[in-house]
Amino acid sequence: MAQPDDDIALRVQALEQALVAKGLVDPAALAAFVDAYENRIGPKNGARVVARAWTDPAYKARLLENGAAAIGELGYGGLQGENLVVVENTADTHNLIVCTLCSCYPWPVLGLPPVWYKSPAYRARAVKEPRAVLKEFGLDLPAEMQVRVWDSSAEIRYMVLPRRPAETQHLDERELAAMVTRDGMIGTATI
Amino acid sequence: MNGIHDMGGMDGFGAVVPEAGEPVFHAEWEKRMFAIAAAVPFALPFADDHLRREIERIPPVVYLGSSYYELWYHAIMALLAERNAFSPAGPQGANPPLQADAVDAAILAGATTRMAAPHAVARFQPGDAVVTRNINPHDHTRLPRYARGRHGAILRNHGTFSFADSNARGDGPSPQHLYAVRFTAQELWGPDASRRDDLVLDLWDAYLEPAS
């Protein structure tokens, strides 16, 4: 008996065949999209951006002024990052990104979103009880720190610039980039 | 549209549970569905506004029982039907399909919704007190229920962008100013929320009225 997963797999296969027959998609182009997002466009891009900002104050200033232009300096940009704004975590404020209406996410720097980011639980709760959600991620923020949630349901995509960990002065940009996690750039973790 | 997609503030969905390993795709069909949704608009132009409109029209029971790329499947099928893509005469006015060697450049070029709007007036400046309108349109909107009729303050003006509500309805982009608007957590969620915390939501000019 066919399982639900087989059913949707067959339906997508039939859709692709129909689109190819109508001359609306090229199968090789589909493979190229998959390759780009499976193998090249992911959180390593964002980590490089963060490490550059941690080590180059002028770059950090440009990144906070115009995120899309600054990631463009490192060769990143385009789909779902055309209008990127980078928000900085400080000693007083912790930022958290969500998209309640959809699952909008800054693809050029973080890749495609994880399943939990797209889940009803995260979308419903991150705006109303961000501190409870952060605790489930193991992040228990002090009451005196402000939590600022960014609901990116419109045309701007957001990325968090995490705080640079203490005692990392001896690390170079490449070593710092290796420390930066995807969740740190969503705001569900610190570095 | 007051649909199931408008989830901000709902209860009952349980804990946020990351999956093990977190693969980018979980099956071959997810890869192909993602890529179809990325490639089709080059042949049959549609905006994210239209894709989102169709996702939001999926009946709530189906929506909640579907994975992310299954929602995309339903929405793409609806958009293709709207454009008569599979009728014998075929879709009207389709462009040639995007070729594989053009994909990287297409990704990097993106598809911004930022648009010049020389006649659009910025009614608000950073720091201005505003109140969101209480609207309940049957169509696509980016003003979530939890933020309707709420007092906030303009944090910044992002510039002028295609207005999703208008574009999704088929009335054209009608670009207007888009603002980051800051609301206190207590304004949105009442006295039980933290006194320190706040939320920023990007809202078009048409959603806002001045507040004193």
Image (cartoon, coloured by chain):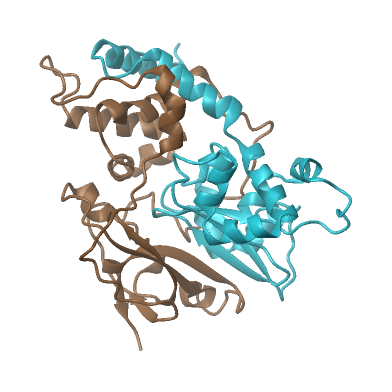
In the image, residue B196 lies at what x, y percent? Answer: 62, 77
Question: Quick check: B36 above or below A75?
Answer: above
Q: Quadrant of residue A94?
A: bottom right
Task: State the residue in front, B89 or B139.
Answer: B89
Question: Quick check: A78 above or below B123?
Answer: above
Q: Residue drawn at (20%, 28%), measured in percent from left and top? A: B81
Q: Quadrant of residue A1?
A: top left
Q: Residue furthest bottom?
A: B212
Left or right of B126? Residue B137 is: left
Left or right of A99? Residue A16 is: left
Q: Residue drawn at (69%, 56%), measured in percent from left and top? A: A162
Tint of chain B: brown
Q: Residue drawn at (31%, 26%), measured in percent from left and top? A: B40
User: Does the rendering let one see residue A4?
Assistant: no
Tint of chain A: cyan
Left or right of B198? Residue B66 is: left
Task: State the residue in front, A128 or A148.
Answer: A148
In the image, residue B52 lies at what x, y percent? Answer: 33, 43
Q: Residue drawn at (58%, 56%), measured in percent from left and top? A: A63
Task: State the residue in front, A90 or A122.
Answer: A90
Q: How many marks?
A: 0
User: Does the rendering let one see residue B203?
Assistant: yes
Q: Residue furthest left?
A: B89
In the image, residue B104 lies at what x, y percent? Answer: 47, 27
Task: State the residue in front, B87 or B167.
Answer: B167
In the image, residue A180 lies at what x, y percent? Answer: 73, 46
Question: Quick check: B39 above or below A88?
Answer: above
